Amino acid sequence: MKSLTKAEEQIMKALWKIESGLLMEVVESMPKPQPHKNTVATILKTLIDKGFVKTENVGRFFRYMPVITREQYSKSTLVNVAKGYFEGSFTNIISFLVDENKLSVKQLELLLKQIKKTKK
């Protein structure tokens, strides 16, 4: 899966939130300060070309809809981070987070409980 720029990611987050929408609905669902509608329209065109968004004609307007779910993109991004920075190892990611004090022992214990529960 192709990666997104920060601007493309912001627009995808807005689309994931509203599920589908016309150009102005996408703009209005973005955080302040909102980009100009022409900027959003240009980025939406790029997202269509990349295969992340599809359109549906609604009169003389387009309704924009995400093709890829947030979960699919998150999974792909995490796998790419693991491959690119942690030798493909999720264990290395967890170790890094612990070393950087970004993950506590309590959080690790909860994670372990979740893993055990999932494996049953």
Image (cartoon, helix red, strand yellow):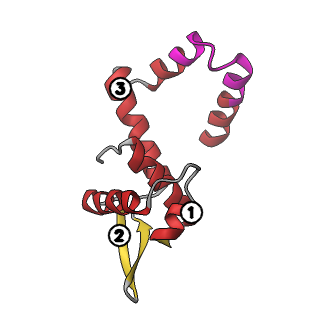
Instruction: Spot the residue most to the right.
Output: 106
Among numbered discs 2 and 1, the one appearing first in the sequence: 1
Q: Is residue 62 left or right of residue 50?
A: right
Q: Amino acid at mark 3?
A: Gly
Badge 2, how many Cα within 10 Å: few under 14, some, many 20+?
Answer: some
Q: Which residues are magenta?
A: 96-110
Single out the mark in the foreground, 3 or 1: 1
Q: Say what amino acid the circle numbered 2 marks.
A: Lys
Q: Residue at x 30, y 63 (%)?
A: 45
Query: Mark 3, mark 2: which one is toward the viewer?
Result: 2
| Residue matched to label 1 | 28
How far apart in space, not on screen, are marks 2 and 1 (Cα)?
19 Å
Occupied quadrant, residue 104: top right
Residue 98 painted magenta: yes
Magenta stretch mostly in which secondary structure? helix
Q: Which element is circle 3 on?
A: loop
Residue at 35% x, 26% y is 88
- Which is nearer the eye, 114 or 106? 106
Neighbours of disc 3 within 10 Å: few (<14), some (14-19), many (20+): some
| Residue linked to disc 3 | 88
Q: Earlier in the sequence, mark 3 or mark 2?
A: 2
Write down the residue under mark 2. 54
Q: Is residue 106 left or right of residue 60?
A: right
Q: Residue at x 29, y 46 (%)?
A: 2
Is residue 9 inside the magenta stretch?
no
> Which three-letter amino acid code belongs to the residue tagged 1?
Glu
